[in-house]
Image (cartoon, coloured by chain):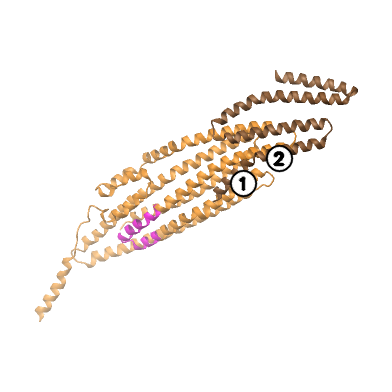
Chain colours: A brown, B orange
Amino acid sequence: MTITVGAIVAIAIVFLSLYLKTQQKEIAVLFIVSGVLFLFFVVLKQTGEALYVIREISQKSSFREEIEIMIKALGIAATAQVTADICRTAGENALAGQVELIGKTEILLLSLPLATRLFAVLQNFLQ
Amino acid sequence: MKRIISLIFACTFLTFFCADVHAVDTQIFSEYTDSLETLVEKMPSELKEKYTGIFETPDGVEKIRKSISFSSFADFLFNSLEEAWPSILRLFFSLATLTLCAGIFHNFNTSLTSPALSGAVSFCITLAFVILMTGSVDTLLTNALLYLENLTNFSSAMVPITVAVTAASGKLTAATVSHASLMLLFTLIQNIGTTILSPVVRTSYCLGIAGAVGGMVRLDSVSKCIRKVFTIVLTFLSLSLGFIIGTQNILARSADTFSLKTVKFALGNIIPIIGGAMSDAVSTVTTSFAVIRSAAGGMCVLAIVVFLLPILVQLVLHRLLFSALKGAAEMMGCDREAKVMEEVHGTIGYILAVVSLVSLLFLFIISLFTLLGEASV
């Protein structure tokens, strides 16, 4: 049902924004942004259930920390992607680029404990 | 005067009848019990229990002969499989779950249109993979080095008994050659772990991982090249060594057989009356030592097989595991993870090659030592 709802909402927003662009361009952009955010939260809700299952599986394994980091990285990437797309839709490419850079930096900082652990493991291995 | 000279001559002649001729002691191991017990001490624990004190029994040789059979080999193989199987299964399920999670995350990742963001997420996922893989490789390398250490200790216990028994049976040339071969093998095994196995595995693995994680620089081909070169060099060295040692031993055996036959002939023809008995006694003595040699050789072969089986089973099962997981990772579109698995697969293959080469060379030399006992005199 989610794909049907999403498709109907997206198509409705497209039609309305096409009409509003001829009347008031700014309102059209706001409308599109609202639609994107709405669909993003619907996706988050659905994905949350899948991620909950993955987290449950990882709790019983030896790589729980790694899975947590991967889930957070995906979340940061998705948020940064949506924000950058909204900025591009509003015509602000520079802002979009900066948001992507922030997201990339955030993910790399998040993977820093993994990198440190890998260096320690490789150091032990080489000795 | 003539009587005195005749008396002196008769006394000198009579001294030949005072030669000490006796039958061979039935306890043929008695003089070598200490050395053989030292050899048993260095054996794996499963064989230590079986062979401790076996040389003090009169039917020790028969017991050793019965213990070397296909059923005992099969028992050791199944025991090794039974010990390795649970840890392999646990590792398989952990890595399969991680591969599945990585596949799911990669599928989410492909929906990101920004290459920067998807690259960062891929990097994060690959890092997690590499940490878990390195643990497995480290464990296998440690076990392989431990195996080589056990072989070194065992070969150091083998050298005195093989040389002593071979020399005592009159095969002096063969004893010298045997000592030289075993010392060369001992030096080879002692150094192969520290100079060939460990540095090559660590270097090639780190290069391969750097290439897989970095993604931009293809270092995995360099690591494959390093492993291939060292495998070819080792194979060539082992073949040359085996050929040289084999030829030396065969020539030494021929020389000793000729010497012993000469001694037998001299004894039989020069010494009157008891010369024939002495000549037969020489044959009996050499045959007795051949029995010791065969028994010790058979025990050593079994000991090496028991040392080898656990590490061999581990390496083969791990190799199959990573081959299967590599296929699964490729199916799910995790290219970087598949590269990491391929690197681990290649590294395990190299460790397997080195362990197999060393073991085959060792078995070859022990077989040579055992076959020397079959020289007919």
Q: Residue at x 41, y 38 (%)?
A: B79
> Of residues B295 and A79, which is closer to you in this image?
A79
Q: Does the image show residue B111? A: no
For the question of whether residue B69 can be seen, the reply is yes
Residue kind at label 2, given as amino acid type: Thr
Q: Is residue B177 left or right of residue A56?
A: left
Provide the chain ID for the residue under circle 1: B
* Residue B373 vs residue B123, the one in the foreground: B123
Q: Nearer the viewer, residue A100 or B346?
A: A100
Q: Which secondary structure is most common in the magenta stretch?
A: helix
Q: Is residue B63 magenta?
A: no
Residue position marked by numbered label 1 in the rendering: B208
Q: With B131 as the anchor, is B51 left or right in this view?
A: left
The span shown in magenta is B154-179
* Quadrant that contains the C terminus of chain B: bottom left
Please say whether residue B162 is one of the residues in the magenta stretch.
yes
Category of crowding for the residue at label 2, using alpha-carbon neighbours closer than 10 angstroms: few (below 14), some (14–19), many (at least 20): some
Residue A121 placed where, x, y %? 56, 45
User: Crowdedness of circle 1 by 10 Å Cα count: few (<14), some, many (20+)?
Assistant: many
Residue A105 vertical position relative to residue B3 in the rendered view, above or below: above
Residue positioned 56% across, 30% down in the render: A59
The chain letter for the residue carrying disc 2 is A
What amino acid type is highlighted by mark number 1? Gly
The answer to whether dots 1 and 2 both sit on one chain is: no
- Residue B215 drawn at (x, y percent): 68, 43
Q: Position of residue B6 (x, y in %)?
A: 12, 76
Q: In the rendered image of this protein, does residue B159 appear above or below residue A23?
A: below
Q: Give the residue number, with chain letter if any, for mark 2.
A: A105
Residue B66: numbered disc: none
Q: Is residue A77 above or below residue B355?
A: above
Query: Residue A79 is drawn in which quadrant?
Result: top right
